[in-house]
Amino acid sequence: MKSKKIWITLVILIMMLLVPLGKVNAASDGYLQKIKDKGTLVVGTSADYPPYEFTVKQSGKTTYVGLDIEIAKKFAKDLGVKLEIKNMNFDSLLVALETHKVDAVISGMNPTPERQKSVDFSNVYYRGKQYMLINKKDAALYKNIHSFKNKTIGAQAGSLQYDLVKKQMKNNQVKGLAKLNDLVIALESGKVNAVAMEEATAKAFAQNNTSLKVINPEFNVDSSQTGSAMAFPKGATSLVQAANKTIAQIKKKNLINKQYIPLAGKYMTNNSKKNSMWNYWTYFAKGIEYTLIITVVSVFFGFILGVLLALLRLSKSKLGKAIATAYIEFVRGTPLMVQVMFVYFGIGAVIQSLPALLAGIIAVSLNSAAYVAEVIRSGIESIPAGQTEAARSLGMSQTLTYRYVIIPQALKNIWPALGNEFITLIKESSIVSIIGVGDLMYQMQLVQSATYKGVIPIFITMVIYFVMTFGLSKVLGYFEGRMKHA
Amino acid sequence: MPNMIEIKNLEKSFGDNQVLKNITEVVKKGQVICVIGPSGSGKSTFLRCLNVLEKPSAGQIIFEGQELTNISEVELNKLRERMGMVFQSFNLFPNMDVINNVKLAPLKVKKDVEEEASQKAGQLLEQVGLADKAEQFPLSLSGGQQQRVAIARALAMDPEVMLFDEPTSALDPEMVGEVLKVMKDLAESGMTMIVVTHEMGFAKEVADQIWFMDEGYIQEKGAPDEFFANPKTSRAKEFLSKIL
Ligand SMILES: Nc1ncnc2c1ncn2[C@@H]1O[C@H](COP(=O)(O)OP(=O)(O)OP(=O)(O)O)[C@@H](O)[C@H]1O
Ligand SMILES: [Mg+2]
C-alpha cells in the first residue's frame, strides 16, 4: 500500500514538471507588464555570431556587442527597463524561451514555420543573403551549390542554413555543430569543404581570417524563411507588438546599416588586432575559478548525498533500498549532459529564477552522489562478512560494528576512489557550459569567438585542465601515502 | 550440574536446503562438547544458531533459562556478550593492534573504563602467551598467534560459554598445538565449551561428550572413550574409518 502512495506522488510530480506553465500566463498575456514590473528585460543570445552578436573585452570585462545587441538595447530603452543578456548555445535558446529562462531571444534567428509553431516572432528586422565560407585555396573549385558534389558542408545545428543544405544539396553530407567557431576550425582543417552561413557573418569571418573567402552559392531561398526576427514566448502578443514598434523606428532611420553594422565592424577589427592569448588570461582565470567552485561544491554535496544513498541502499528497509537503487541506476544510466539540461530547463520551469550556475551545481552534485554512493557501497561490501560476525559475536550492535570495525576499514578503499571522483568532476563539469555557466569550457568558447582563433584556446584549455587534474592527483596521492603510514 | 543451553527441535533451512533437521540436546554447565562430522553436515550452522548469528527456522534455543529465538536485537546483543565465539579464519580486526582488538568490546559494549580494560586485556594476552605482541597489528602475526588473540578477545567479555568453529583448521600443522594448549587450559579452568573440530586427539583428551553430526542430525553421542572405541551407528563407523 505504501508503495502505491509513492507511485501516485511520483506521477503527480512528473505531471507538474510537464505541464507547460506558459499556457497559464498566455491566457492573460501579462508579459509586457511583468517585464515592466521587474524592471529588466532578459534576452537570450548565442554570442558567437559576428556581426550579430559576439563578445569583446572592455577594460577587463566581457561585453556582448553586435547589431542584435544594439537592437536589444534599443528595445529595452523603449520599454524603459534594464537589459540583461544571457549567453547560451543556439540550440538551447528556444527551450530557454519556452521555459521562461529568458523573456526574448535575439540571435540572428530566422522565423521558420517550424519555429513559429513553438514561439512567436516579431517582424523581420534584417534580411541578409545565405552565403558559404570556403578556404581561399579552393576558390577556383567552388562557385555555387552545384559545384560541391559529394563534399561535406558544415552548418550550425538547428539553423536555417542547415536545412537549406539538407534540402537543396542532396548529394552532400551535412555536418552540424553547435558553434560556428568549431565549424570554421573544421573548415580550416579540411573536415568540411564549406560552411553555410548568413551573409554578414560569413563576411565577418573572411575579413578576420585571410585564408578564408566567401561565395554566394545561390541557395533557392523563400524570402519568408530568411531574415532575422526576435522571438517571444507563444502568446506574448504584447511583447511582439512592442518589439515591432521598436523595429519600425529602427527601419525608418535605417539604424542597422548606418550605425549598428559599422559599430560591430569596429569591434571586430579591434578584437582581431589584440587577439594574442595574453590579452585573454582573465577569461581563463575566471573559467578556472568557476570550474573549481562547481567541482568543490558538487564534491561536497555529492559526498553527503552519496553517503545517505549508500546507507539507504545497504539498509534493511526494502523501500529505502529500492529508492536508492533506482536513483543510482537511473543517474548512472543517463548522460550528465541530459541531466544538466533537465535540471536547468525542467526544474527551472517550476522554479523560474533558478540561475544557471546553481542548476549546474545541483545537476553535477546529484550526478556525483550516485557514483559516490556506489564507491561507498562497494568499499563497505569489500569488507569480509567475518568482520561483522566477529564483532556481533562480541555483543556489538550493528551501529558499533559499523563505526569501529567496518567503516574504518572501508575508508581505506573509499578515499582513493573519492579522489578519483573529484578529478573526474573537474573534467565532467565542463558539460555545464551548455547552459551558459561561465566555466573554463565556456570561457574557451568566448575566447575563440573573440579572437577568431580556434585551436590555440582549445590547447590552452586542455593544458589548464591537465594541470588541475594532475596537480590534484599528486596532492591526493601525498595524503594517501601519509594515511597508509599513519 | 545445571543446564547451560537447551536446544529444542532446532531446524534451519537455507531456501529449499534444510541443513538442520530436528536437534534436541542439552549442554550442562562446565561441560566440554566436541562436535564432529563430515564436511557440509551442518556443524557450523548449528554453532551459529546457538548465538543466533544464524536465525533458526524452527525450534528453540534456551540459554540459562532465556529463550533466544524470539527476542529483540538489543536483548540479543546483551546475550551474545555472554557467549564467546572463535572462528576458523580468526577474524581479527586488521585496523587495530592486538591489545585494542581485545579491548574494543569491553570498552564500547560493557563501557569498562580504559585502565581496567587495558589491565584485563594484558592479563588475557599473558594467559594465551602473547603479552609481548600487544602493540603489533594482527596481520604481522602467525596464524597460531592470531587465533590465540581471537580467543583472548572472546574471553575479554567474560563469557559463560565458548563456541569454537574449527579453530585450528586454517593453521599450519606446527601451530595447531599452541592453540589446542590454550583451549585445553581453558577447559580445565571449568569453562563450558562447544568445539567443532577435526582434531580427534584433542576431542578424546578434553571432551566430556562427543556429538557426531551428519545430514542435519546429531546421529550419535557419547563419552569419547566409548565413542571412538566402539561407535554404534554405521555412519559414525564409516566417518571414523576415513579419518583415523
Ligand atoms: N549462508 C548460507 N546460505 C546458504 N546455504 C548455506 C549457508 N551456510 C551454510 N549453507 C549450507 O549449509 C550446509 C551446511 O553447511 P555448514 O557450513 O554448516 O557445514 P559444516 O558441517 O560446517 O561443514 P565444514 O566441515 O565444511 O565446515 C552446506 O550445504 C552449505 O552449503
Ligand atoms: Mg564449518
Image (spheres, coloured by chain):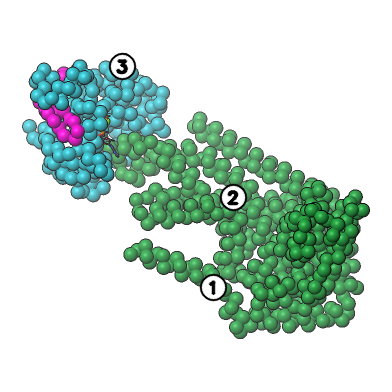
Chain colours: A green, B cyan
Q: Which element is circle 2 on?
A: helix
Do the dots labelled 3 and 2 sit on one chain?
no
Q: Quadrant of residue B138?
A: top left
Q: Residue at x 51, y 34 (%)?
A: A483
Does the magenta portion include A308? no
Q: Which residue corresponds to mark 3?
A: B173
In which chain is the residue bearing label 3? B
Q: Which mark is residue B156?
A: none
Estimate the spatial distance between the alpha carbons at disc 3 and disc 2, rounded to whole Å.
55 Å
Stretch in magenta: B201-225
Residue A329: image location, x then y, percent: 48, 52
Q: Is residue A329 visible?
A: yes
Q: Is B168 left, or right, of A315 in this rendering?
A: left
In which chain is the residue bearing label 2? A
Residue A450: image location, x then y, percent: 81, 56
Q: Residue at x 15, y 39 (%)?
A: B22
Q: Which residue corresponds to mark 2?
A: A296
Residue A442: image location, x then y, percent: 71, 55
Q: Which residue corresponds to mark 1?
A: A19
Estimate the spatial distance between the alpha carbons at disc 1 and disc 3, rounded to whole Å.
74 Å
Q: Amino acid at mark 2?
A: Val
Q: Amino acid at mark 3?
A: Pro
Residue density around tag 1, few if under 14, some if 14–19, many if 20 or more, within 10 Å: few
Q: Which element is circle 3 on?
A: helix
Is the residue A134 above or below the residue A253 in the image? above
Q: Amino acid at mark 1?
A: Val
In which chain is the residue bearing label 1? A
Task: Locate the N terminus of chain A and report the quarter of the image it occupies.
Answer: bottom left
**Which numbered mark, 1 or 3, is in the foreground of this view?**
1
Q: Is mark 3 within 8 Å of ligand 1?
A: no
Question: Whereabouts is ligand 1, in terms of quadrant?
Answer: top left
The one of B117 and B232 positioned closer to us in this rendering: B232
